[in-house]
Amino acid sequence: MEWDLIITIGAIAVLLVLSAFFSGSETALTAASRARIHQLEKQGNRNAIIAARLMQTRERLIGSLLVGNNLVNILASALATSALIRVMGEAAVVYATIIMTALVLIFAEVLPKTLAILRPEGFAVAVAPAVGVVITIFAPVTSTVNQIVRLILRLFGLRADAGQVYSAREEIRGAVDLQHAEGGLHKAERDRLGALLDLAEIDVSDVMVHRTRIRFLNGDDPPDKIVEEVLASPYTRLPMWRGQSDNIVGVLHAKDLLRAVQAAKGDMSKLDIGSIAVEPWFIPDTTSLQDQLNAFLKRKMHFALVVDEYGEVMGLVTLEDILEEIVGEIEDEYDVGVEGVTPQADGSVLVDGSVTIRDLNRALDWSLPDDEATTAAGLVIHEAQMIPDTNQAFTFHGVRFEVAERERNRVTRLRLSKVPDAEEA
């Protein structure tokens, strides 16, 4: 009898170890980072290759581990109850329940899962071969259980494979935001990674230089005047028109002009400006920044003119504009590194009406919507459904917008300040 009791206790101990293995393996293989496992896989780690394959079939993985875990837990409880009944009689059922609950909870659930959470990738790689064997053994049982579960869900109008699918960008964005919230990433790093993910969702019209701010050249002017204008301009590429301002005939590069002046030995009358300028590149305003970045790299060009659906020139976009959308403007000694955004001593911010909402959100860490409007002034006009007067103020999205300056129908400057939720309500 004593040997039977010792063997039973030993069997219970083995079953608890198996239960701990199943619990820890489930936690590790579901919590492990697929990206880190992939890195180990690329380094030739055989166990990581197995772990990656197991993580791709999570339904089978979790089903097999749950079957094994429940099997050993129930068997351990049955053995413990049987052994105690022989020693203590019918009252042993209560004691067996209390003892096994404590043992399973501490040694087969909390302890292994805590260890797995602390080092999920290492734990997952270590147990992957053994888990692969378990899945193979329990494959028939797991398949049967999964089919039964699917049938039950169908009775309630649910489908097991109808879960929400997240894109890779959404998954990365969530990880970036989580790391920033936990202090793992600085705001500037979060903004750059977020901007890189946003390239496919932003059109060139959102970042282009508007035509009212473009410095054009008149191709009908004398060559010497054109040379003077190019020298006086801070830009190296200038669009050129002839006849009327909408007739863009070329883009003049300052370096090409300099070579032509040298070839003509300084004689401006010999310059043929039309032959120096390169053919303009027109792109639709609905082109995404990601597509345009790829096009710039493919064509080895840095400059394009943006046109609307009617073919009218709306503005221009350069490779530098797209890169600055990712890395942001170069900051100086001021806290806010966006042109047209000036913090005030009272906590408010003076903002030019032409400042884009994306730049404003990035500079001030706000979350103003940019779906219906691109600029700060456009957002005020859209929300107010009118062109506001000077000193008129509105409050929406948790921000107070006060019109500081207006020129004709254009809101040129705003004063912005955060307001409490109660005041907004």
Image: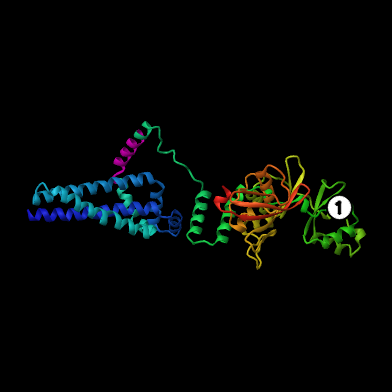
Q: Is residue 142 magenta?
A: yes
Tell me which corner region of the image, top left, top right, bottom left or bottom right, holds residue 195: bottom right
Q: Residue furthest left?
A: 1
Q: Which residue is mark 1?
A: 218
Q: Nearer the viewer, residue 246 or 404?
A: 404
Instruction: State the image coordinates of residue 173 (x, y, percent, origin top left).
Output: 52, 52
Residue 126, visible in the rendered structure: no
Instruction: State the image coordinates of residue 2 (x, y, percent, origin top left).
Output: 8, 55
Q: Main secondary structure of the magenta part?
A: helix
In the shown orientation, is residue 398 left or right of residue 272? left
In the shown orientation, is residue 215 left or right of residue 368? right
Which colouring convention does the figure follow?
A: rainbow
Tell me which corner region of the image, top left, top right, bottom left or bottom right, holds residue 152: top left
Q: Residue furthest bottom?
A: 333
Secondary-structure class at tag 1 = strand
In the shown orientation, is residue 417 left or right of residue 261? left
Q: Nearer the viewer, residue 165 or 358?
A: 358
Q: Residue furthest front?
A: 423
Q: Which residues are magenta?
A: 137-151
Instruction: State the image coordinates of residue 103 (x, y, percent, origin top left).
Output: 22, 55
Dot 1, how many residues are within 10 Å of its Cα: few (below 14), some (14-19), or many (20+)?
some
Q: Vertically, is 343 above or below 281? A: below
Instruction: State the image coordinates of residue 307 (x, y, percent, origin top left).
Output: 74, 45
Q: Is residue 297 magenta?
A: no
The residue at the point 91 percent across, 59 percent down is 270
Q: How many marks?
A: 1
In the shown orientation, is residue 84 left or right of residue 390? left
The residue at the point 29 percent across, 58 percent down is 111
Residue 26, visible in the rendered structure: yes
Q: What kind of residue is marked 1?
A: Asn
